Structure formats: structure tokens, C-alpha cells
Amino acid sequence: MNILSLIIFIPILFGLIILVLPAGLRYIYRSVTLCATLLQLGLSIWLYVQFKTGAGFAGVNHEGQYQFVEKFHWIALNLGAMGKMQIDYFVGVDGISIMLLLMSSVVMVVAALASWEINKNHKGYFALFLLLDMAITGVFCSLDFFLFYIFYELMLLPLYFLIGIWGGAKREYAAIKFFLFTLFGSVFMLLVMVGLYFSVKDPATGYHTFNIIQMMNPANYDKDSIFGFIGTHMLLGMPARTVGFITLFIAFAIKIPVVPLHTWLPDAHVEAPTPVSIILAGVLLKVGGYGMIRICFGIFPEVATHGAFWIGLLGMISILYGAFNALAQRDLKRLIAYSSISHMGFVLLGIASQTAEGLSGAMMQMVSHGFLSSMLFFLVGVIYYRVHDRDIYSFRGLSNLMPKYTVFIMIAFFASLGLPGFSAFIGELFSLIGAFNSQTANGLLPTWMAMGASVGILLGAGYFLWTLQRMFFGELKIKGGQVWKLALVDISTREMLVLVPLSILTLALGLMPSLVFAKINDSVLAFVQFIHVN
Amino acid sequence: MQTTLLHTDPTIQLALLAVLIPFAVALVNLFLVKNQSKVSGWLGTLAILISFVLSAVVFSRVWNVGDLHSQWLWFTAGKLQVGAGVWLNNLSVLMLLLVTGIALPVHIYSIAYMQGDEKYSRYFAYLGFFCFAMLGLVVVDNLLLLYMFWELVGFASYLLIGFWFTREKAVQANKKAFIMNRIGDVALLSGILILYADFHTFNMVTLFDNHATAAFVNAADSTWITLPGICFLIGAMAKSAQFPLHTWLPDAMEGPTSISALIHAATMVAAGIFLLGRVYVMFSPDVLTLMACIGCFTAFMAATIALTQNDLKRILAYSTISQLGFMMMAMGVGAYSSGLLHLATHAFFKCLLFLAAGVIIHQMQHLKDEHQLDIDAQDINNMGGMRKGMPVTFVTCVVASLALIGFPFTSGCLSKDGIMVQAFYWAEGKSWPHFIVPVTALLTSLLTIFYISRLLFKVFFGEAKIKEMVPNLKTVGHDGGWLFSLPMIFLALCSLFPLFSFHPFDYSEAWIVQGFGIAVKAAGSISYETLVALTVNIFGIAIVYLAYTLYISRSRAIKQSGFLFKLSYHEWYIDWFYHRVIIKDVLRIGSVLSWVDRNIFDGIIHLFGSVSIFIGKITAWIDKYLIDGFINLLVTVVKQAGNFVRGFQTGRVQAYLLSMLLLIVVIYVLKTFM
């Protein structure tokens, strides 16, 4: 078992421990979970440090350039005349996945620390939490489509229960909405996956394969297969490859989420308990962005180039739509949920620009948003845990009562609205550089689209500062009176332990973007080149 | 000029130190020094003093000697290598000196002014950070870094304007300042990125160094030069409070007065003019004309508003906007050097005016608290007769006011007359509408004389209004300690001509103008120098007399109900328009989209769900009544058939015999007759 598999399966190992521990020890479940996530984080950091860079380690469409690879035959069925059905256990990382892997390990630790507040059915909660952890980690490492799909679907199950059982008032509605939305996308993804399987042949063995990297090579496609590059197969009146791309795009666009496929997100984020909101916003949305890059753009690059205008437009619409909606919210958590939609729009815009800058920006934005949205949801959780209210108008002048808390809120807000020096600035900046540059570099996105997207930065300042002014500044005036005054104590040591590292991380990435860029650069360049060759 | 490495050039290192020391001390003040500790004030002042000395050294080594540039790699993204570096030329070293030169008296003044404040150390930490951001802005060599510091200046001003964050007005003001500036930031960022798309570099030395002008001149497609030019201009307009993005500046006075002094003089609003100066070569003639018009209009508009305001700081704020308009106009008409000279001279006298205002308001507040009066401490209608109690404040204030109106022997005379003269030369030879610009500027400078006279008369002359409320009051106010007076005297001396030129009247003799050397050549038929000087001085005396009759001898009065008065008093209804129209509409878009989200997008999902459930119900009905019904029917039929047949199974032999007989008979009948 190599280190990557170890990272993937550590949570499940600890999950088993939790399952066998008696219920009397339920208060150490959370420590066990924290241990699992910390161990995972330690290994991820080691992975990050050991990760080699250079043109020879770019990965993307060269199987040999992936690092920490583990590959063996997993399911082998002899189908007689149809050859051999072969599914591999195939994991490995390149520049596109390494940062997301590290980021998700950090977010998992944060979520584990936020889970301290869980107060019912501990065993179920922590077992599901660790199952989710495994699935998410698996998604970022899988290089076999079948394996990817299994991990991808496996995420849904624990999330459904985590929202549906430990969530807020409308939890059942939110859980079902989330589940059905995502399932809707992934069912059709299954069809495309099978179609791809029957179109691609492993040149070494001559059998069909689920290997994602081989799906990226046009030479591996059968001549008259359904998704073949030169094939003339039509589905629903469109070329089959276009249909395949759109199907995968919708599946991942739901995850990102892209307007108008986003309505599961505000409900799920708002109803989920704090740690699950953290995971949803911090990691799950990035699964969408990652899938978009690796699978959607990786397997159907020529369709992606063809449709770049529309993808970019959706990105711009998401940015503006999310921001305008955030302006209209009065529930703090909902506001942050909509701001997530807005910020993830930059990811889509960056990817759509298909320039090295844009793609770097999208990657940076994903990592940055992972940290920042965790921080934001954690901060909302702090208030909600104390007084069970999140309405912006229930609070005023909170900085008088919770000065330390206000400092962190200001860090998180200003970082999110793209203040230079913080990571989100670099992410948004490079997405925008890509979008502006696209006009001259490859002619995909017009300049007005980039300018429209930059208005999102302005609106971001609007809703964040307005919230700051309404909730935190001015004279102290809170809805719950004296009871709330006593309940609203400033942040505790455990909460500091979460907030300080996250603040430092977002500051560090903003000042030293090379912490991310140095690791992803070769892959990004290789990926852009790969797209343009096809 | 050549690009050097960091470690080889001591001047660059000194400049870096000058930038970083205030930041380091700000961090110390924020984290290490106890709140309310006196140490923080002296520490901050010491830092800015060191910074000032270093700036002076750097200045002496770079000014008119040669540019310096030093750069190192910051990070690489894709193939784009982003460098971080320092680019020192005449403009940036002048700004270094100016910013630290203004920040130093402000620091000293703040020690006394902020005494006893709950967040004394925090104040000096923010102040240091503010200076750091501004100093960083003026030395960086890279557009991305420039943008970063540009935003940090805005962020620092956000912290300082909202320093007393329990006041609702203060937090409204800092939000407004940040968002207004964000509009400019977005434009600036767009401009930077469009330039990048064209030239593939963020390096300002490559882009804007005088030798690189060729890049812009030869650019094939001129809209791609005009467009970023306009973007940069909008950025500068927001920072330098030009119409229509100026409304944040009058509100920004909600911060401590010492901060207003800094913002209005050398840090925040100067950034916009500095930006224009730094990237001057990229502006096409169209953009320059636009710049001149905006500057001229802003100068005029702000001056008319200042005529009727009653809040001391608000008058000064509009005065700043007006003077910034002059600078913007100077840049637009090509009077580059005079614009920057005005930036420098204005910094001193405006800073002084604000510091004086701070002392006056301090005294009024003191009186208000002492006698428990229900008055606005900043309203000039409550002041009067203050020259007796506060001679230092009075004298320095008069010097600053004279400089503001461009009175001979003050620094303002050099810079402001220069701008107007060159504006005339600019209009000369162009079509007649171009003359609107210099004529309006001339008119504006007359308005300036009126509003500043009004301010002086109302504050310092006449009888103290406060005595009407408190009859036994002896003197109104006093100057305060040396920590107040020293900075003001220093600034007053700097508002006189010798600092800038040995010749008190000829602006072209000023060393700043000679250092930049870009001026509109005197080629006209009329000597505009004389015209401007005569107009300003002759009409000036008349206007001062008019103000005197209005406010002191009260032999005349102004009708306060006319349309023009209302327009001026309500600040041209611009803020009203923003609140009623723009902000409201943006929020309305937000709520409409939120409605769309809940009802249309979610509605579609719910419809989808309802339809699915409906289909499910239909299938359930079909399942229950048709499919199950069919099965049930079959069952019933079979059951009934069984029941029917069962009737035959009676167990009696006779019955069986009967049925057998019947069967046989039937068969027989059928066989026989068919």
C-alpha cells in the first residue's frame, strides 16, 4: 500500500475503530476523528513537500509523469468474445490534484474541530464523517473513471445522512434536494462513462479501459466508436462528443455550482450542521471544479474549446448572480452560501479562458476558497452555536462584545472580498488575467465578459462591508437582550486553533503565491498545451 | 538607467527601509505594545522620522541624478514571471519625501490629539500601516504591486475613517469610502489587465519609462490605448475624489481629524494624482482632454458647494476636492510639472488647515462638554472670535488660507497660477470651447477666495457666538501644547514660497517644475501670467471685502432660499441621487434576483418534483386499479369459475348420475342433430 492509498483509507480505518468502541466512550469519538484527520494532514504535507516539479512531472496526459502512483487490477471479468472487462485500482497525483488534496486535508481537520458541537448520535455521525473523508480524498486521487465514479457516488451517501439527521429545521428537504440534484448529474455521467469505456482501448492490452489518462489520448479511441474523435455518431441531433461533454459538464456544474443549477447549495449549506457546511463549501464544490478540469476538459478538449464562450458566460453570470443574491440575504449563512456561488464563478471563468494564467487562477481560487469558506462557515457556526440565530438584523455592534471574533470576521471578509495580500485576491486576479488575456491569446472570451466579471469584485465589497457595518459596528444592540449578552462570549481556545492557522494560510498564499503556483505550474502549462493541440 | 539587483544598490535598500520601517513599527504597536501605552505614539513618530530622514537621503541621491530600478522574482504562474521591485525616479522620490514630510507632523500632532483614547496604540498601528501602504505605492515598479498597495491604502483608510466604530456615521462613512474606491479599483484593475493583454508585462519601467513611450505611440490600435487610459483615469478619479466619485471624501471626516489631515494632504487622495503622473505617457490626447474637463468641473462644483457648508471640516473637504480638481486639470492640459507642484504645495497647507480645524474642534468640544451645551462642535456658526485665544492657530490658518487662494509670496501662488496660465496656453490655438476650461478655473479660484474668507471670518473674527450661550466666558479656546503648535508652525513655514522656489512669482523657477520639465510652452500672444495674477488679486480683494460685509459688518445678507443656494447647500443633490437611485436600484436587482432564485429556479425544481410526484400518483393509480385490477379480475374469474364448478361436487351419487345422464344426453343430441 503506497502513501496515497494510505491517505485515502486512513479515515475508514479509524471509522472502524469508532464503530467498535462502546457508546460509553462517545466523547472520545471526536478525538479519534481528529487524530485521523491530523494523520491524513501530516501525510498530505509530506506528499506536498516530496512532490517533484519540472516538465518531466507534469502529469496531465502522460501516465508516466504522475507521482505516488499505485495501480493494480481490481475487477477482471472475462467476457469471451467481447474481450476482458478490466477495472483498475489506479491512484496518483499531478499538479492539478496535489493542491486540492492538501487543501481538503486541512479543511477536514477544521471540520473535525468544528464537530465538537455535535450532541446527538455520536457514533453514526463520526463514522459517516470518516466515510465522507475517505470518499473525498479518493476522488482527488483516482485516475480510473470507474474508481472515480465509485468515490464520487460514495460521497453522497454520508452527506445525505449528515444533513438529514444532524441538520437544521428544514434538514430533510435540504438533504433530499441535495441528493437528487447531485444524483441527477451523476446518473447521466454513468452513461457517458460506459460510452467512453466502449470507445477507448488500452493500446498495451487491446482491451477496453476506464483509464482516464488513456481517454485523453485521441489515438486510443476506436475508429467508429461512439465517442471517437473522427466518428460521426449523432445523439439527439448533435455530435456524440458534444452530448458527452454537455452531460459531464452538467454533472460537474451542479457540484461547482453554476447558475442555474445552484439551488441545492443555499439550502444544503444553510441546513447542514457547521462541520458539514465547511466540508460542502470547502471541499465538495472543488470536486466539481476538479472534475471539470480533469474529466470534462481533459477528455473532451475540442468541445470545451468550442463552447468556451458559453462556459465563460455561465461563469460570469454565476459571479454576478451570486453576488446580487448575497446582497439580498438577511441570513448570514445564506449570504455566505451565495458568496460561494459568486466566488466559484471565477473558477469556471478561469477554466473557460483556457490560458495558463486563467487555469492557475482557477486552481488558486479553489484552494483559497477552500480555506476561506471553511473559515466563514466556521465563524457563522460560532455565533449560531451560542445563540441559535443567524439573522443579520438580530445583531448590531457585536464588536463591543466579541472583539477577537470581529478581528477574524474582518480577516475572513476582507480576504474574501479580494483584498491584496490574501489568497482570494491572487485567485480572482489570475482568473481575470486569463479572461482578459483570452481575447488576444486564443480569442475565446471577449473583453466585456472579463470586465463584467470584475464587477463581481465590487459587489463582493458591497455585501461584505454592509454586513460588517450592520452586524459588528455601531452601538451594541442585540435581539436576545441580557441572555444573549451572556451567551455571546468571545472565541475559545479551540476556536482560535482553527481560525489562526486558516488566517495564516490565506495570508501566506496571498503573499507567497508560489506555494501553490510552484507545484502546479508544470501541469497547468502541460494542460493548456494539451487543450490547444487537440 | 539600468536595472540592478537588490543587494548591489544601497539607495534602493534605503528606500525599502523607508517603506518598511513604519510597517514594522505598526506591527509592534499592534501586537506587542500595551493598549493605551504612551510608547506607541513615540515609537510611531520615531519610525516616521527615520523614514523621513532615509527618504531625504534617497531623494538627494536620485532627484535629477538618474532613475534607479531594482527587481527580483516574486512568483511564476504559467509562463508569466511576476517581479517585485523598486523604481525610483524623480516623481517617486518626491512623493517619498512628501508623504513622510507630511506624516511626521501628523504623527507628532496625533500624540497630543489622541491622548486618552481607548485605542491609542491601535491608532498608531493603523497610522503606520497607512503610511506604509502609501510609501509602498510610490516606489513599486510593477502594476500588480501598485494595485495591491493601491487597495491597501484604501483598506487602511477604511480602518482609520471607521476608527470610532461605535459611531454609526463613522462606519457608514468608511463603508462608503471603500466601496466608492472599489469602483475605481475595478476600473484600474481592468485597465492593468487590458495593458497586460496588449503588452504581456506588468513591469512599469518597461511600460511607462519615458524611453518606452514609443510602445504607446506605435501601438497600432488606438482604442486599446484609450480604453486602459480611461480605466486608469477612473481609478485615479475615485482615489482623488473627482466627480462623480467624490462623495466619499466629505464623509470621510468622521475619522479622527489628524487622519483627515493625512488623507487630504499626502496619503489617500494624492495617490490618484500620483498614479496619473506615474503612467502619464500612456494617456492619449482624448483621455487628457477628458481629464482636464473632469478636473475643471470638479474644481468648480466643489468650490460652489464649499460656499454654503457650515461644517468646518466639510468646507475643507470640498476645498480639497476642488484643489484636486485643479491638479487633475493640470495633468489634463499638459501642465504635468505644475500639477505635481500643486500636489506638493497643497499637501502642506491643507494638512495645516485640517490640523488647525482639529484644534478648534477640540476646543469647541471642550467648551461644549464643560458647559453642557447642545451645539455641534464642528458648526462654524457657533464659533467666532477665536483669534484672541488661539494666536498660533489663527496665524498659521491665515498663512494656509493665503496659500490656498494663491496669494503672492505663498507656495500656492507658484503652483495655482502656473496651472491656470498653462491652461490658457493649452486652450490657445484650439477651438473656443476649450477656453471654458481655463476660464472656469479662474472663476473657481475666485470662489475659493470667498469660501475661505467666509471660513476665516466666521471662525476667528467677530464675537464668539458661544458667549451668547455662556455670558461669563472670558476667552474662547487656547492653542494647546507644543505638540499641537510645533507641527502647525512647521507646516506654515512650508506653505511659503522659499521651500519651492527662490523666485516668489515665477512658477517655472520652482525646482519641482524644473525637475519634471514637462510644461506647456509659452507660445501665446497674450501674457496670461499677468492676466491671471491681476484677475486673482484685484477681484480677490473685492471678494474678501464682500465676505467681510456679509459675515462681519453684516451690512448685506444672502437670500437662503434661492435655487442656487439650495443646490450648493445640498451638495448638488449628488449623494441624494446615489442613495435614491443607484443604491436603491442595485439592492432592488438583488431582491429581484433573490425572488427569481426562490420562485423561478427553485420553482422549476419544485415543479419538477411535483410533476414527478403527480406522475408517481398516476402510476400508483394505474398500478392499483388497472394492473392490480386486471390481476384481481383474473383472480375473481378463476375464483368464480371454481365456485361454479365446486357446485357440482356435492358428494351425492344420485347427483353425479344425473349429471352423467345429462352429459350423455347432450352428447347424443349434438351427435345426432349436427
Image (cartoon, rainbow, N blue to C red):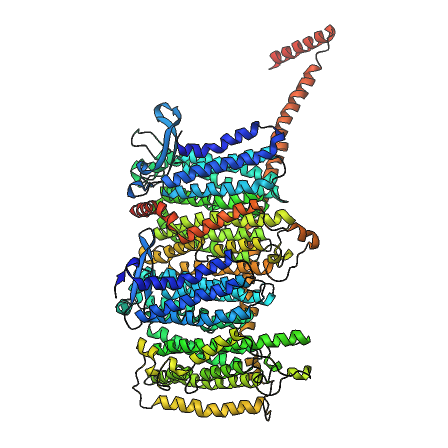
- Is residue B245 visible in the rendered image? The answer is no
Position in image of residue B127 (x %, y %)? 49, 65
| Above-or-below relation of A118 to B598 | above
| Above-or-below relation of B7 to B512 | above
Position in image of residue A467 (x %, y %)? 57, 58
Q: Quadrant of residue B478 in the image?
A: bottom right
| Above-or-below relation of B214 to A360 | below
Q: Quadrant of residue B112 in the image?
A: bottom right
- Is residue B387 visible in the rendered image? The answer is yes
Judge from the rendering whether residue A119 lies leftward or rightward of residue B325; answer left or right. Answer: right
Q: Quadrant of residue B151 in the image?
A: bottom left
Position in image of residue A423 (x %, y %)? 44, 52
| Closer to the camera in the image, B43 or B155 | B43
- Residue depicted at 53% across the width and 50% down the height: A376
| Above-or-below relation of A460 to B257 | above
| Closer to the camera in the image, A170 or B471 | B471
Judge from the rendering whether residue B191 lies leftward or rightward of residue B465; answer left or right. Answer: left
Position in image of residue A299 (x %, y %)? 36, 41
